[in-house]
Image (tube, rainbow, N blue to C red):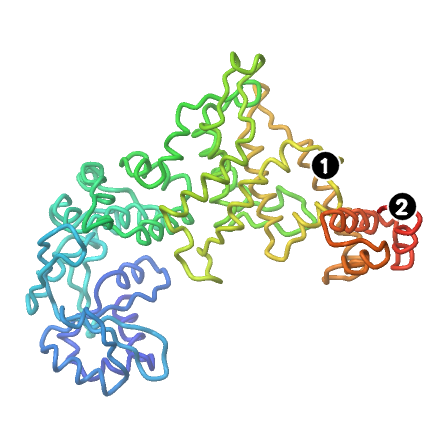
């Protein structure tokens, strides 16, 4: 299979540059081989060329495209972009890095070493594989065996690997979640032992691992297996470094009448598992709008939805009846603002699956109680439209969040209470029927805008106009106003000034 894959990639037009190198001395290395063996798609094509100098490699590559002017050229790593392509390939000389300090730039690179020495500096055995263009595999550190055993194992001494670059700890946790692999015992012990290296100061205000790298590795692992990454971060001591607010949920009691499942931390983990159930079977929620349990926003909103509970905790003795968390939704939204300043969760580009819209995520946390604790009969139709018929589908994500939250809120009877949630689904359906009946997939236009309302009632701009506009919208969505003329007559006859 590997030989077939190597032959296949050499036929791609972007790989034409490979023709200028000796097949026996040019090696595909790292993640691509791992992905080939696991039969997963890959874009991670990195090559090591054994028998050439840097000048020779650069000269050959320039015949087929552009070599980027980047710092890594000094270390024998060439960023190459083929002609008529946006792909970037790493073409490198074999090298070993010797760390001289705490920063990621504090290293000396030794170029021109053997392939085995080059592979020995890599993070995990499953990434320390190489295969030349003739299809001859090099496995110096047991990577194939670890792939077969589904094991994450550091190359050589794990303490040395993680001291060199503590971002490898986060990468190992992420790979364990993405690949569903176990972590080898000594490797895990080293992760625990060196966890604090991740946030240790390096230069000035910098940490050894950049916040963007922390956020990126976390999001990849969290998207793949949300509960497992949180448990692994907790087990290694990294949770309290990256997300101390989540770690503080542990031991925070909840009223047993509603929460027989345990403390806030345990409730959150159960809710994340319940979202997985919904992801597997979306028909569990019969909604008139599309739900999106796979969304990174829905998953993160569950993780953060009770962020404010430790801060707003009031004991039964303090309240006079039971444990309460009054205003925890608002408090959690404010705390999330602070988390974004420390951990840049919006690290991935827009329109990619892992991009996090800060405003949307904060909105979901702030409004998560709407579906679980508010009587739907008291919610205005205009509010329903605003929440659940938003173009960015935050309404569907709010429903996914709420389903998981309710499913994880287990009373002593053992049966979560979906009565308010089901009532809300019915009301969403009634609004959807009005909108769809009138305009199909298009938004239902308002009969009157703010300017027209001010002109008809001879009013100046102010909060009053918004309230009147919402009142007209409620009546329109309820089918009680059916035309612009009826809306004007309603304004004129009801003394709304």
Image disc number at residue 120: none
Q: Earlier in the sequence, mark 2 or mark 1?
A: 1
Q: Taking 90 as reference, is 246 left or right? A: right
Along the line of sight, which residue is nearer the eye, 311 or 291? 311
Q: Residue at x 19, y 69 (%)?
A: 72
Residue 220, percent from left and from top: 38, 51
Residue 314, percent from left and from top: 50, 20
Residue 475, percent from left and from top: 83, 48
Q: Helix, strand, or loop for circle 1?
A: helix
Where is 59 relative to 135, above or below? below
Q: Taking 348 as reference, is 8 left or right? A: left
Q: Residue at x 38, y 30 (%)?
A: 248
> Cα distance, mark 2 to mark 1?
28 Å
In which quadrant will I find the N terminus?
Answer: bottom left
Q: Residue at x 47, y 62 (%)?
A: 350
Q: Is residue 116 visible?
A: no
Q: Residue at x 25, y 70 (%)?
A: 3
Q: Residues within 10 Å of mark 1 (few under 14, many from 20)?
A: many
Q: Taking 280 as reference, is 265 left or right? A: left
Q: Is residue 333 visible?
A: yes
Along the line of sight, which residue is nearer the eye, 55 or 287? 55
In the picture of the structure, the residue carrying the numbered disc 1 is 376
Q: Helix, strand, or loop for circle 2?
A: loop
| Badge 2 vs badge 1, beta-carbon distance below 8 Å | no
Where is 321 relative to 17, above or below? above
Residue farthest toward the bottom in the current orientation of the protein: 63
In the picture of the structure, the residue carrying the numbered disc 2 is 495
């Amino acid at each position: 299979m590997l030989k077939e894959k190597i032959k296949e990639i050499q036929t791609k037009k972007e790989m034409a540059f490979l023709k200028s190198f000796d097949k026996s001395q040019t090696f595909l290395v790292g993640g691509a081989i791992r992905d080939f063996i696991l039969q997963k798609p890959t874009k991670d094509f990195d090559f090591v060329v054994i028998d050439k100098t840097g000048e020779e490699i650069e000269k050959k590559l320039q015949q087929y495209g552009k070599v980027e002017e980047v710092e890594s050229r000094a270390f024998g790593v060439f960023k190459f972009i083929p002609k008529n392509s946006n792909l970037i390939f790493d073409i490198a000389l074999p090298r070993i890095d010797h760390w001289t300090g705490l920063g990621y730039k504090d290293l000396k690179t030794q170029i021109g070493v053997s392939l085995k020495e080059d592979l020995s500096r890599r993070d995990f055995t499953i990434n320390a594989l190489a295969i030349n263009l003739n299809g001859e595999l090099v496995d110096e550190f047991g990577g194939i065996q670890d792939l077969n055993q589904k094991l994450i194992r550091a190359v050589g001494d794990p303490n040395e690997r993680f001291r060199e670059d503590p971002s490898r700890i986060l990468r190992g946790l992420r790979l364990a979640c993405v690949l569903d692999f176990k972590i080898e015992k000594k490797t895990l012990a080293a992760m625990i032992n060196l966890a604090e290296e991740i946030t240790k100061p390096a230069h000035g205000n910098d940490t050894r691992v950049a916040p963007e790298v922390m956020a990126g590795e976390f999001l990849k692992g969290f998207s793949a297996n949300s509960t497992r990454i949180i448990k692994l971060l907790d087990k290694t001591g990294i949770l309290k470094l990256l997300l101390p607010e989540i770690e503080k949920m542990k031991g925070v009691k909840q009223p047993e009448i509603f929460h027989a499942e345990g403390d806030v931390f345990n409730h959150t983990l159960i809710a994340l598992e319940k979202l997985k159930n919904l992801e597997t079977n979306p028909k569990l929620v019969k909604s008139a709008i599309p739900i999106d349990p796979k969304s990174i926003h829905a998953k993160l909103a569950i993780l953060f939805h009770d962020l404010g509970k430790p801060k707003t905790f009031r004991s039964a003795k303090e309240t006079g009846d039971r444990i309460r968390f009054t205003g925890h939704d608002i408090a959690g939204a404010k705390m999330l603002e602070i988390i974004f300043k420390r951990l840049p969760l919006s690290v991935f580009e827009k329109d990619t699956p892992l991009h996090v819209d800060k405003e949307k995520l904060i909105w979901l946390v702030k409004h998560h109680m709407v579906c679980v604790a508010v009587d739907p009969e008291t919610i205005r139709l205009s509010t329903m439209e605003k929440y659940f018929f938003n173009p960015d589908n935050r309404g569907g994500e709010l429903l996914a969040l709420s389903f998981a939250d309710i499913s994880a809120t287990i009373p002593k009877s053992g049966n979560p209470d979906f009565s308010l949630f089901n009532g809300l689904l019915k009301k969403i359906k009634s609004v959807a029927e009005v909108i769809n009946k009138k305009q199909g997939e298009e938004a239902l236009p308002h009969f009157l805008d703010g300017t027209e309302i001010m002109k008809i009632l001879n009013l100046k701009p102010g909060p009053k106009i918004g309230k009147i506009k919402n009142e007209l919208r409620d009546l329109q969505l309820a089918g009680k106003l059916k035309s612009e003329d009826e809306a004007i007559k309603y304004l004129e006859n009801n003394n709304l000034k």
